Image (cartoon, rainbow, N blue to C red):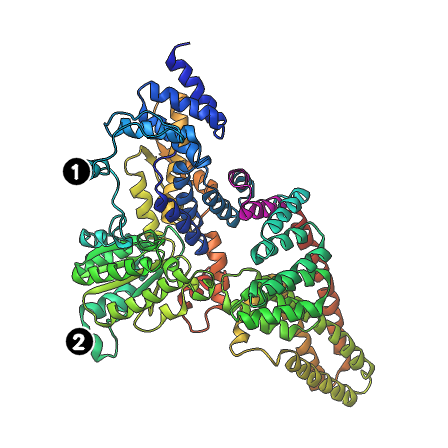
Amino acid sequence: MTAPGPDTDGLADARVRTAQLRRIRRLDDAERVARQALASWPDDAGLLCELAAVLLAAERWAEALPVADTAVAADPPGERGHRLRGLLLSMTDRHQEALAAAWVAVTLAPEEPCTGIAYTRVLQRAGRVRDAAQAAHRVVTLAPSSADAHYLLADVAGDLGDLPTARRAYEETLRLAPEHAAARHDLAVLDANARRPGRALRGLIDAGRLAPAMTQVRSTVVAVLWQLSGRTRLWFVLATIAVLMTADNPSAARIVGGVVLALTGLLGWWTLRGLPRGSWPVLAATLRTDRPLTVVHAVLAVCLLVLVAVVVTGVGALAILVWFALIVLGLLTIVVRLARRRRRTRR
Amino acid sequence: MTDDSLLTSLLAAVAAAPDDVPLRLHVAELLAAADRPADALAHCSHVLAAEPGNPTALALLQRLTGALTGGAAPHPRTANEPPTGPLPAAGFDWAKAEQQVADVREPAFAEDAGSSPTEDVRTAERPMIRLSDVGGMDEVKQRLELAFLGPVRNPDMARRFGATARGGLLLYGPPGCGKTFIARAVAGELGARFVEIGIADVLDMWVGSSERNLAEIFRTARRNAPCVLFLDEVDALGRKRSHLTHSGSLRNTVNQLLSEMDSATGANDGVFVLGATNHPWDLDSALRRPGRFDRMLLVLPPDGPARAAILRQHLKDRPVAELDVAKLVKATEHYSGADLAHVCDTAAERALAASMRSGTVRALTTRDLLAAAREVTPSTGPWFAAARNVALFGNTDGSYDDLAAYLKRHRNL
């Protein structure tokens, strides 16, 4: 009929236990503890918020939303309920309501960085990136020594296209929390987008070592290797033109072929010179996980061998084989890109 | 309307509008009149929680308390009304006062609250199962013998060859593949008590209590040696401290675990610490240092013979017509023990449905089980997706060589 006796220890224990289990990602256990406790204290806003937070972490947004609603109804002046409600509404793409809820949370606790982070995320997801950037700057002012605050600013600045701010903020995040794998990964993505594949690969390998189970690291490494293969193909096109121009003269073909090989080696060393020790087996293994990429690199290796054959035989016309190979690779790249885009849109 | 039905309707109304104070007070009055003071008191408390100074509720509370403690219910008195009864005697009636508070629960100190976490250690039994009871998994058993059981059984010989019986053993692998069963079998081999410790046995809301619980568990284990202390899902207790920046209490628990591991395994006093985890990469690196969990053993999904044994076990009490075990074993590569049980259950459900339709018992066939295997996807898939990444990026010190070799063998790397 009503709640049992006021066993406040039991209630506090359930709240703390749920929060601890959530922090160590024991989400099923955390949910069980919260639900068991809610059977005794069904109107406790703190407990409802804990359950909503667990379900939010488990990405069960539709189930979490009514729980957050109940938490807000049980304790209207409580900031956390509104904050969670805002995040959950945002995750279910109800952006206007999400903004209203997150705004209530911010007005209730304007000095609380967590609330500012939530409000920024809601703005970001609603597409109001400029406002989100302003909010993120405010969060950094509130919590200048919080790695999460700087990571948020970096993320929003990246979305806004403000790459210098994003880079600075990622670097600050890593200064404050050197094991922040997500920041390391995202900084590497910035490097890749800035056409610095060597730095990007170094960052990605670091991120992979910090959080080996972070599956997106492998896919980003694959993307960077595709980018590198594109560069190499472009270089081979130019190199082949140079070799073919000297096809009539075997000595000249030998010299140009040799210079091309030397420059290829030099460029490769220059690009990948900063890779940490033990990176090569990682890159080779990652390469093998993507079949089309393996084929592309195998063909590029064959192209190199053709250039070696030009140097050895002096027959510059052999370089035409490189062109054929590059045309085949171009077609393969287009097919793979189309197929993957189609698969992504289907998902 | 009778009193009961009136009360039922009013209680329903209270349930629909829990914050309606006058209604709740009215219900409380009716319950008190119906000689249900405990129920009335609950409603009264609810009202006072919402409006702490509500005079009607206070008066009713006074009346109800009197009724519940057996004394005559004092007449409700307004604030301005002067006391009419005699003043209390100078000598206070302690006996009566104590009687009144006899049912009040005594406040407990943090360490006394709840049942003791060491209860399980004291009452632990010595498992009767041995490694020979584990079906298949010959490679795991061999490695277990070489890396753990051998040095523990022959410490002197191990010392001569530079090996040591110190340190704990970490079993890792996808969920549902029998890590706990193997740990029990290890305890059986050593003739030691088996104590399974989970996160729930340790976590406590009071500052410092989780650490104390952990210390007490290890202390009791030492007192009850020989003992296999099995830390299930050890990544929950020993999570990377860099991931616990917001929780000082959990960080301290990891520190305590490190210190306990040092003292438990360093002294080699008959406490064998075994851990199991699905995510060894989430463990704090300090836990993997020598003397702690310095030996790791990959427990993979059951191999062919193990799958055959598990399938036979799950089908032994069910009607089975003909069974091509080899075909089933081939179709269930990467399935965990739990997945195999699920396959058998699904096939049994299907056969049961067919039997009910026909009215006669239709025994399970290979076809039923193959169809069920196609329906049930192995739950180990997401684990292997993460494991592939780990083998790629996280194997800098060769800790995951076994895993990498397995993945290569199955063309996943």
Dot 2: few (<14), some (14–19), or many (≥20) neighbours within 10 Å?
A: some
- Residue A220 visible within the image: no
Say which label, 1 or 2, has the lower sequence index: 1
Q: Which residue occupies the foreground of this view, A190 or B155?
A: A190
Amino acid type, callout 1: Ala
Q: Quadrant of the N terminus of chain B?
A: top left
Locate residue B58, reporting x and y percent.
39, 31
Q: Are marks 1 and 2 on the same chain?
A: yes
Q: Which residue occupies the foreground of this view, B299 or A215?
A: A215
Q: Is residue A175 left or right of residue A227?
A: left
Disc 1 marks which residue? B95
Relative height, residue B274 to residue A245 (above, below): above
Q: Is residue B299 left or right of residue A286?
A: left
Locate residue B195, reporting x and y percent.
24, 55
Relative height, residue A153 to residue B38 (above, below): below
Locate residue A37, reporting x and y percent.
39, 41
Disc 2 marks which residue? B156
Asked if residue B278 is among those painted magenta in the image, a careful observer would answer no
Amino acid type, callout 2: Asp
The quarter holding residue A199 reads: bottom right
**Residue drawn at (18%, 76%) of the image:** B157
For disc 1, the chain is B
Relative height, residue A195 to residue B55 (above, below): below
- The range drawn in magenta is A68-91
Secondary element at tag 1: helix
